[in-house]
Image (cartoon, grey):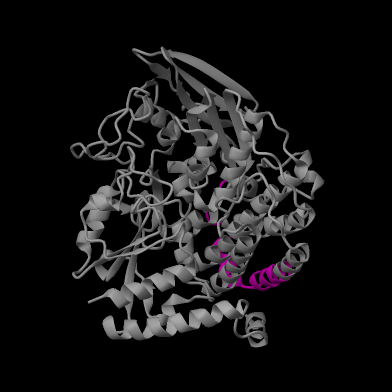
Amino acid sequence: MIKFWKKRAENSIATRHLKFDKDLEEIKKELKSKIGKKFAGSLAIRMVSSGSCNACEAECNALLNPYYDLERLGIHFVASPRHADAMLLSGVVGVNMYHHILDAYHQMPQPAYIITLGDCPLLEGTFEKSVAIKGAKSLDLPIFHHIAGCPPEPKEIIEGLLTFLKHLP
Amino acid sequence: MKQDRLIARFALEHSNSFEIITLFDGKVQREKLDKDNPVLKSISSRYTTATWFERKIRDDFDIKIVNAYDNRPLIHHERFPSVALMKKEFMNNEIKFSEYKPYKYESVKGDGVFEVAVGPIHAGIIEPGHFQFSQEGERILHLEVRHFYTYRGIEKVLEGKTLMEAKKMIERISGNESIAYQLAWFDIVMQASQNGYDEKLKKYHCMLLEFERLIHHLTDIGFIPNDAGFGAALSFASMLAEDTRVFLKELCGHRFGFGAVSFDVKDYDKDKIVEFLDDLDSRVRWFEDWIVDIPSLWDRLDTTGVLTAQKAQKYGVVGVVARSSGVKIDRRDGDFYKKYGFVLQSEEIGDVASRFKLRIKEIYNSISMVRNFIDSTCRVDKPIGFKDGEYTSFVESSIGEIFMFIKLKNGFIERFYARDPSFINWQALYLMMEKDIIADFPLINKSCDLSYAGSDL
């Protein structure tokens, strides 16, 4: 472990993309204050994949890396829908996931918000409504916010979450 | 007795018969079935991984399988109506949910034995899938993997499209293997248009593929220690992975390489690549040097989730999982790749530690290969016409061997089939649980890092 601490002392903060970091800092500041006001400092998100190609999940995982580090802003990806304020829904809503998404949604405490992630759920991208693809609209659940992109980049997801917070009543 | 490796088994529909194609390593078997009363004899007693292939054939085409020990549906879940989606006569664009039919899981019965159901929605940020454990206290007695929650019917949707139209969907079969799928598609495009594969273009494509492998492996060398409770490794390695992804975007315009494989090479800065690779190489070396010195981590990784070479061969597993068990199969093992510095990496023991070490070795090999793939830009003409026929292609993705089959008729796709490496490896996952406790499952699962979307299609 000594090696690790030595390395840490050598280069303490990762600054690789200066311009990008600057933009991000601005967004993050705003995000933190919004979450502080509207969710008492902690926004819990339940990520549900309903038949995506796993790129959206990879980008959400990337949000937790040291460059973005969402957790320090108070955004947590939680393990149970019962702990969640919002559901981040990715994927095309395939036939085999349809009822499981409904189950997960009904386990969430109200008010529960659905945020669709990527082009898939609203069938705006490559995938169209077809025999095994139902799309998020068929769920008949209120979709509160949409983050577009295929897949949306981490920065776009952060911006999307910020707009989500701005739109909240 | 050494047996051939089963690569794929799938059905084709003709106007008055079904044809079952069974592909082994080095030979193909074709079998015609009567269309009115199709009956297929199972080979699952000899080739265990034929089980999922045959269950899929039955669900897709309503072909009766005899002599099978597993007759449960695979794609047809609890509320899936009993319709054979893949049949040509099935033209509906929508299916209605049917009554709930319970699925009978494989389970061990006995005093004190209990079952743990995990999924389809998991605790982390991950795709859906179900794992059913039979437990004796902490010890895993049996695990059944049940997937196909992300089933999107891609095979059906692609029918009737042209090769060029199909591209966008093929690159989204599995996000973390996107470039590999695109290469398989491109290979088939080249075969069907009877154009030669320009060497410079091939070098560029292979470079992208190695970048994809780098990203996948870098992510994994962080996630594996993280699942053993060593989070610092994830922080470090996810930084490397993110840097590589940002660099891939600079190189080809997309963080996952969607749309990257086409008929021309985008102009790129050669010095910048070399500089990036030097930096990456030194940081991975530092990471390796650091992580080999953490005894509590290796205590978790060593001897956990062992897959012996004998079992790996019997199940015909592919990719990283196979090579970690000492089964030396790699689709890159040919003249072209060897010319650019490919060396087949392998480990012997087949535990989580082997898979972890193998990934680090492959990272070094990929870095040196990318250096050799650097070349000038070029451009080839878009093919105009495609010749009808059956085409197959193999590509080694970051998980393992991808097999793709496309049959063209009048210029349109008559049948599309792709077998992801995960489709085989998922079936062998339970073998690795024999001596382990349930707390080791996430670690073992992550060390294989298989794709859900790829195997479900």
Determine if residue A63 is in view. no
Report whether A121 appears left or right of B206.
left
Q: Residue B311 falls in which quadrant of the image? A: top right
Measured as percent of width and height from the top left, residue A168 is found at: 26, 75
Furthest-right residue in view?
Answer: B339
Residue at 42% across, 14% down: B15
Q: Residue B67 falls in which quadrant of the image? A: top left
Q: Please identify the quadrant where the C terminus of chain B is shown.
A: top left
Q: Which residues are magenta?
A: B281-310
Report whether B280 appears left or right of A168.
right
Q: Nearer the viewer, residue B322 or A31?
A: A31
Is the residue A167 above or below the residue B334 in the image? below
Q: Please identify the quadrant where the N terminus of chain B is shown.
A: top right
Is the residue B237 above or below the residue B40 in the image? below
Measured as percent of width and height from the top left, residue B217 is found at: 60, 58
The number of numbered badges drawn on the structure is 0
Residue at 33% across, 53% down: A122
Majority secondary structure of magenta residues: helix
Q: Residue B27 falls in which quadrant of the image? A: top right
